[in-house]
Amino acid sequence: QTHRARPFPCDRPRADRPRQLADMDDDEGVAFEGETIKPLVERIVQKEIAPDYLWNAKSSDLQSVVIENILKELAAENENAAREGKRPFKFVVLCELQQNVGAGLANACTCHWDSSTDGHCVFKYETEHVQALVTVYGVQN
């Protein structure tokens, strides 16, 4: 089991209905919240990396597929938010994959931004054969 010094923003409990980007309002002072996109990231990663997926020569292509699909869905949510008069976010999506052979997978980041509006979420997925770590950064325009 993974030990974390502090919980990631996407580990906080969600309401019955996950919030969408369009639910965020500048007047509320709501920042990018990782839990709003964690279900989206989880769904895409689990769809693309099947539990029985075996590491192979095309595994590096899988990273691109995961990133592209996450960005497509985030862009669609951004459009919905913009139609409702909300400020859109810019996104950075990282996907780290490695064969699960018992080695550790470490990741660190630091950001200099406006923490009242910007944020990130980290999603870890592990099967018998593959470890994935997906990080999404949201920075308000």
Image (spheres, rainbow, N blue to C red):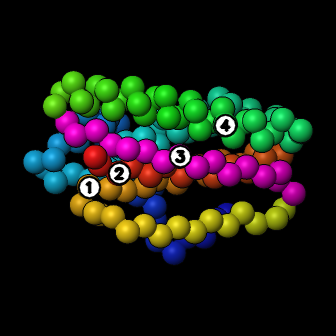
Query: Label 1: which residue?
Result: 117
Q: What stretch is highlighted in magenta?
A: 86-101
Mark 2 and mark 1 residues within 8 Å of each other at the beta carbon? yes
Residue 34, given in percent of the width and then of the height, sits at 40, 50
Secondary structure mainly formed by the magenta segment? strand
Q: Which one is earlier in the sequence, the residue at label 2 or at label 4? A: 4
Residue at image position (68%, 52%) is: 96
As measured in the structure, the alpha-carbon distance from the residue carrying label 3 to the one carrying label 1 is 17 Å
Query: Label 2: which residue?
Result: 139
Q: In the image, what residue type sits under mark 4?
A: Ser
In screen coordinates, is 27 left or right of 48? left
Q: Can residue 12 be seen in this view?
A: no
Q: Quadrant of the N terminus?
A: bottom right
As measured in the structure, the alpha-carbon distance from the residue carrying label 4 to the one carrying label 3 is 10 Å
Q: Can residue 58 be seen in this view?
A: yes
The secondary structure type at the circle numbered 1 is loop
Residue 93's tag is: 3
Mark 3 and mark 1 residues within 8 Å of each other at the beta carbon? no
Residue at image position (16%, 31%) is: 85
Q: In the image, what residue type sits under mark 2?
A: Val
As measured in the structure, the alpha-carbon distance from the residue carrying label 2 to the one carrying label 1 is 7 Å
* Residue 97 belongs to magenta span: yes
Q: Which residue lies furthest to the bottom in this view?
A: 5
The secondary structure type at the circle numbered 4 is helix
10 Å neighbourhood of mark 1: few (<14), some, or many (≥20)? some
